[in-house]
Amino acid sequence: MIIAIVNQKGGCGKTTTAVNLSACLASRQVSTLLIDLDPQSNATLGLGIEADPERTVHRVLTDDEFEAAGAVYPTGVFNLDIIPATILLSGADLDLAGKVGRESILKNKLDFLAGRYDLVIIDCAPSLSLLTVNALAAADEILVPIQAHYYALEGLKMLFQTIKIVKSRLNYRLAVLGILPTFFDGRTSICRDVIVGLRDYFGSRVFRTSIRVNSKLAEAPSANEPIHIYAPDSRGAEDYGSLAEEILEKLGKARPGYPEIAGIRTGY
């Protein structure tokens, strides 16, 4: 099962969600692979990975002979591995421009790897670039973080148009796992109104969990630790723990032992 965390708008908590959700899933006995598909490589940096430039997602995408397994690194979190990124990824669109089937390179590479993990999480760049299209072509499900502010709602239209195109042309199985409100502050009326608006329009596609504003979430990357290790009693740890449980519920994960994922489509 591959989940792409995507929103073309920056600053909505994609990388924070990718790192902390992956770590919380791993802590629940779910073997997880995190793929950093953002040229800013913040997920890589936030987990303290010093990547060899010859063993990153850039080479996975650009070298036909290089297998994805060759770019997998262990992290400091049990059950969590990562395929890291470096600044080299910023030139990937040009590097891939002349390749046949360039939109599906990541999918084809992951076909030989994804079966080793219960879940694969892809942290996408804040754009609708060829890298993001590769993530959408490879994914089974999409998780959309959205900042609980009015203007954030406007960007969803373009994103869902892109998802519709990818679904019809490249990946018919692509489904929306859920929309995740982030930076939620229940003291402000705009945050409350945005959540109400999201639930009115998208219904059950909006996660029950919202990620609340929490300074510990901003501090954790400087310690190269996910939030449930850096500040296990914080609101951030509580929220991402709840999100992990909700996702396992959505995916039909049996407990205890987590023997197999039975994907429950939420539809587009």
Image: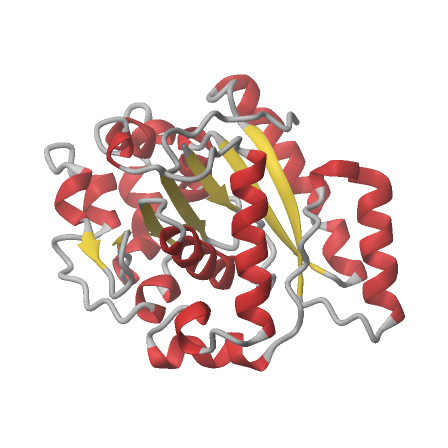
Residue drawn at x 47%, y 25% is: 262
Q: Please say whether residue 98 is visible from this viewpoint.
A: no
Is 93 rendered above or below residue 77?
above
Is 188 rendered above or below residue 67?
below
Is 32 rendered above or below residue 264?
below
Taking the image as shown, residue 257 lies to the left or right of residue 88, namely right
Q: Position of residue 147 (x, y in %)?
A: 68, 61
Q: Position of residue 165 (x, y in %)?
A: 58, 25
Residue that extends furthest to the front in the rendered view of this protein: 256
Nearer the observer, 153 or 185: 185
Q: Quadrant of the C terminus?
A: top right
Residue drawn at x 57%, y 81% is: 215
Taking the image as shown, residue 239 lies to the left or right of residue 23, namely right
Q: How many marks?
A: 0
Q: Quadrant of the N terminus?
A: top left
Residue drawn at x 58%, y 55% is: 242
Q: Please say whether residue 132 is visible from this viewpoint.
A: yes
Nearer the observer, 184 or 56: 184
